Image: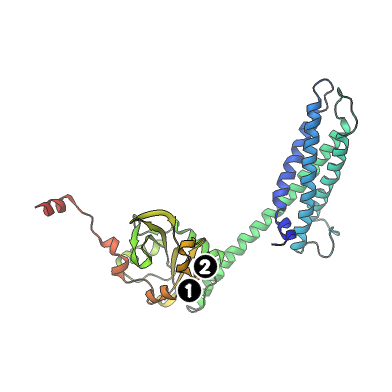
Amino acid sequence: MHLLDWMAGQHIKVVVFALATGLILPYALIAAQRPGRGIKPWWTTSRFLSWVGISGAVFALITGELLAKKQGLLGSDWVLRGSWSDLKIHQYFGGGAVFFGILCLRAAYQPRKEHQGLGMYALVMGLFWAVSAGTAGHYGFKMARINNAGRQTKTQANLENEQSAIQATDDSPVPTNNVRIFRILDYASLVPIHSAPVRSAAHNNRWIRVWVSSNAAEAYTSGNPLPYGTLVVMNSVEDRWGLPSYDIGPLYSLEVLPNGKSRIGMYWSYVPESKRNEFNGAKSVSWVEPNPNLAGCAECHADGMAPFKSRSRALQRKPKTESDGEDQQT
């Protein structure tokens, strides 16, 4: 990543730091106004906060300009002109915070006798600094909320477009995007088929649990065809000495498409080095059919779900009763 791009990405973090310091400083300046013995520690506190605040404000101004440039909000200029907007207010008051911060820092170092306070000039500049920083922060967070709302709207639109693409044709590949990953990661909102992890030889002896859309749970356990739109997710953990371990394995997914066809996928955010040979050396996995890496999975799931006998073996196993135990003893 380029240095300037990295700096632009730090703007929000620096703004919070600079804003907090700028709002705290007036309290130290007020305490530093009292004349008399023991006032010098408040001099030191005010000067320290001034240095920290002005450093944060300058860095916030620089990173903010770089971020706005990167997003194309400033055009060819570095200062917004024309009609007022949230961004323009944010930029101007951010610059004002730097200006008043420099004046406040300069006032804090004016020659004073040991029994005197820092003076009203330093306090007034500190108050102007706090107002400028607070206003800039308010409009900055306002723009951030609007952007987040816009991103959520786009995410919902992506989900609707994905569903429309599936309904339009059962052969069109669904792109691997954040919306689909979120659906898989939210598998706990589905209905669990297994009450406890079971060992699956077909999945490299990992311990797995299956989760199914609520409208398809009964069809899954009875072996009937799954309705269109069903999402099946299988989470896994690695085996350790014949028992489930704490090492998380991949997430397997299957989506039922029109005409009974299905689309399988696999997601693993970080593949341990010892397991990368199973995934062609990949450090992370986010695969969806027709990805060639899923050829082995597609072969087993050529007809969609695995055969009912295989996938329901753990469900069909009857629990032992006391009477069964007595019969075995006799």
Q: Residue furthest right?
A: 111
Amino acid type, residue under disc 2 in the picture: Ala
Coloring basis for residues:
rainbow
* Residue 58, position as x, y percentages in the image: 80, 48
Q: Which mark is residue 282?
A: 2
Residue at the image position 35 percent from the left and 68 percent from the top: 202
Q: Secondary structure at mark 2?
A: loop
Q: Foreground residue, 132 or 101?
A: 101
Label 2 vs 1, first from the N-terminus: 2
- Of badges 2 and 1, nearer the viewer stands 2
Lateral position of residue 192 relative to residue 181, left or right: left
Lateral position of residue 220 relative to residue 57, left or right: left
Give the CA separation, mark 2 to mark 1.
10 Å
Query: Pointer 2 and pointer 1: residues touching (CB < 8 Å)?
Result: yes
For the N terminus, give its image quadrant.
bottom right
The answer to whether residue 205 is visible is yes
Residue at the image position 30 percent from the left and 68 percent from the top: 310
The answer to whether residue 86 is visible is no
Q: Foreground residue, 121 or 241?
A: 241
Q: Secondary structure at mark 1?
A: helix
Asked where in the image residue 2 lies, by quadrant, the reply is bottom right
Q: Which mark is residue 293?
A: 1
* Residue 45, position as x, y percentages in the image: 77, 32
Lateral position of residue 272 relative to residue 45, left or right: left
Amino acid type, residue under disc 1 in the picture: Asn
Above or below for 8 versus 18: below
Above or below for 114 versus 171: above
Q: Residues within 10 Å of mark 2 (few under 14, many from 20)?
A: some
